[in-house]
Amino acid sequence: MKLQKDNAQSGWALWFISETEDELQHASGEIIDSSVANYPKRLEWLAGRALVKELVEQCGMNYYGLEKNEFGKPYLKNHPHHISLSHSYPYVAAQIDLHTEVGIDLEQPKQKLLNIAPRILAATELTDAGQDIVKHCVYWCAKEALYKSYGKRGLSFAEHLNVKPFNLAQAGDLCGTITANGFKQELQLHYRIQPGYVLVCTKI
């Protein structure tokens, strides 16, 4: 597990799944519903809970589990902290902060990102990304992080979530904007590129 602490009540973490379902169940302290039949999905679910549990305990608190609100956004039982989760097997990522809504996303660069890009990127973003799959992946993760931070449905990735063009590096900062229904917020994001994945999260 990789843990990045921003302060005593904020941080994010990454988990590479190598454990069995029983081991992850023990680590998370939770039992997954039998309706989730896909084995990798079961591992993602349990690893996500184990990762959030670790972040909560790093903040000096007890972990009581997760719930979801009416928009499907996860929240902690008995704690005011904001959280966000992402998974792309065999990776799981999570972020927590006491005061600010957070968003984290992790994806593996794949050809399909070029296929869906015209539906999720604005014209300036499409031009900037070109045919670079990794850069497309950064844009996709950034928009997912913005979407998760906003926490409500009904957003168009191309129209309501925008990311300023950037020079691609192994790690860097991005500027994103959420504009929807009279709401406008500019958020700073951080990205990092590793051999197997791209990760983007909101900066606290």
Image (tube, helix red, strand yellow):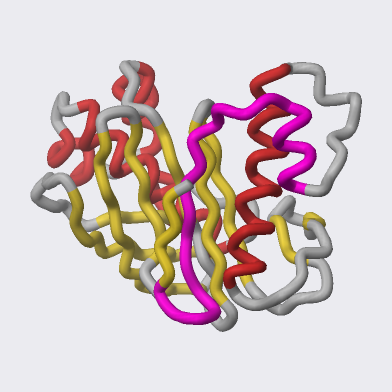
Query: Which residue is at a point 79% across and 59% down the rendered structure image?
Result: 69
**Residue 105 part of the magenta-drawn span:** no
* Res 129 quadrant in image: top left
**Residue 26 part of the magenta-drawn span:** yes
Q: Is residue 83 above or below residue 38?
A: below
Q: Position of residue 101 (x, y in %)?
A: 55, 71
Q: Where is residue 110 in the image (x, y as percent from the top left)?
A: 34, 20
Magenta part of the protein: which range? 6-28
Q: Is residue 168 above or below residue 108?
A: below
Q: Position of residue 36 (x, y in %)?
A: 81, 25
Q: In this view, does 109 lie above or below 49?
A: above
Q: Which of 99 and 117 is in front in this view?
A: 99
Query: Which residue is at a point 13% across and 41% down the rendered structure image?
Result: 128
Query: Which residue is at a point 29% across and 42% down the rendered structure image?
Result: 138
Is 42 placed left or right of 1 in the picture? Answer: right
Is 81 placed left or right of 182 in the picture? Answer: right
Is 95 placed left or right of 5 in the picture? Answer: right
Q: Where is residue 188 in the image (x, y as percent from the top left)?
A: 31, 69
Is 23 placed left or right of 96 in the picture? Answer: right
* Res 146 quadrant in image: bottom left
Outermost residue on the left side: it is 167
Query: Which residue is at a point 16% across and 24% down the rendered structure image?
Result: 131
Give the quadrant of the C terminus: bottom left
Outermost residue on the right side: it is 34
